[in-house]
Amino acid sequence: MKKFEKLEEARAPDGTVLTLYRHDSAYYIRVNGVELMSTRRHHSEDALAELVCGPLAVRERPRVLIGGLGLGFTLRASLRLLPATATVTVAELIPAVIEWNRKPEYGLAHDALNDPRVELRLADVGELLAASPKTFDGIMLDVDNGAGALTTAGNARLYTRGGIETAAAALRPDGRLAYWSAEPDAAFEKALRATGLSVETKRVRAHESSGGMYTLFVAHRRS
C-alpha cells in the first residue's frame, strides 16, 4: 500500500496548520490533521460553481467571487461555464495555498490561475466583501466546513447574521450567493432567509456516484 507523502505545510493567521499530502497521484489538504479536501472527491465543488455560474453564462460581463482557492476545482468549473467577458475574482487568505496551486508539477490550478479572466487576491474574503457593495453577480464561499463544522476559528464571522448581510450587500440585482457546507444546518438556512434572500439547499455527493453527502446553500437576490 502506498503511503501518504507530506509535501508542504503552512499556518493560517489564526494558527491553524494546513498540510498538503500526495497519495497515489491524488492530492489532499488536511487542517490540523483532518482532511479538508482532495483531488479524488470534488463533485460538490464543481456543483457549487454550476449552481451559481450556470445561470450567468448568458450575461454580457458577469463578475463572480470565489472565497477560498482550495485545490482549484470551483475555479476551474466556473471558468468552463462563464463567457470570455467574465471576471472571476479569487480571494485566498493563505499565501502557501496559492503557491501550491501555482506549482505546475502538482497539476492543481496552475493553468486556471493563468486564465486572463482570473483576478487573484491575497485577501480575507470577508474584508473584500465589505469593500465591494453591489459588485458581484455570483459569490461562492467555500472557506471552511460550514457554520456548524468550522475548522478555522477566523472563518466564523462569515456565517453570522452580519457576515451574511455583508455578502448579500455585495451582490448585484438578480445575483446568487452560495455556501459549501459539510452538513445540513437549519439555523444557518434560517439566517440566510432572514436577510431577505430566497434560499434553496442541495445535497450533493463528494464524488459523482459515491462518497459522503454535502450541503450547498444557494441564496438568490431578485432585486
Image (spheres, rainbow, N blue to C red):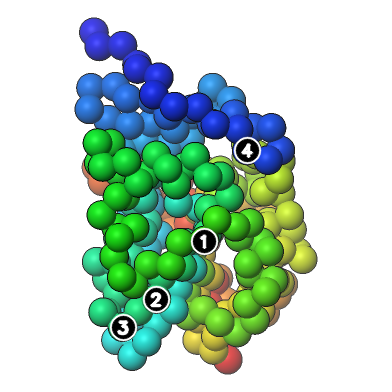
Residue positioned 68% across, 40% down in the render: 13
Would residue 192 be visible to someone looking at this image?
A: no
Q: CA distance from mark 2 to mark 4?
A: 27 Å
Q: Neighbour class for label 4 at 10 Å: few (<14), some, many (≥20)?
A: some
Q: Quadrant of residue 58?
A: bottom left
Give coordinates of residue 20: x percent, y percent: 42, 29
Q: Is residue 39 above or below residue 73?
A: above
Q: CA distance from mark 1 to mark 4?
A: 16 Å
Q: Quadrant of residue 189?
A: bottom right
Q: Which mark is residue 85?
A: 3
Give coordinates of residue 207: x percent, y percent: 29, 41
The N terminus lies in quadrant: top left
Residue type (three-letter) at the residue carrying disc 4: Ala
Q: CA distance from mark 3 to mark 2?
A: 7 Å
Residue type (three-letter) at the residue carrying disc 1: Arg
Left or right: 138, with 159 as reference point: left
The C terminus lies in quadrant: bottom right
Q: Secondary structure at mark 4?
A: loop
Residue type (three-letter) at the residue carrying disc 3: Thr
Residue positioned 44% across, 79% down in the render: 63
Counting the numbered discs, the total is: 4
Q: Secondary structure at mark 1?
A: strand
Q: CA distance from mark 3 to mark 1?
A: 19 Å
Q: On the image, numbered disc 2 is attached to which residue?
A: 87
Left or right: 205, with 29 as reference point: left
Q: Nearer the viewer, mark 1 or mark 2?
A: 1
Q: Which mark is residue 121?
A: 1
Q: On the image, numbered disc 4 is attached to which residue?
A: 12
Q: Is residue 222 above or below residue 82?
A: below
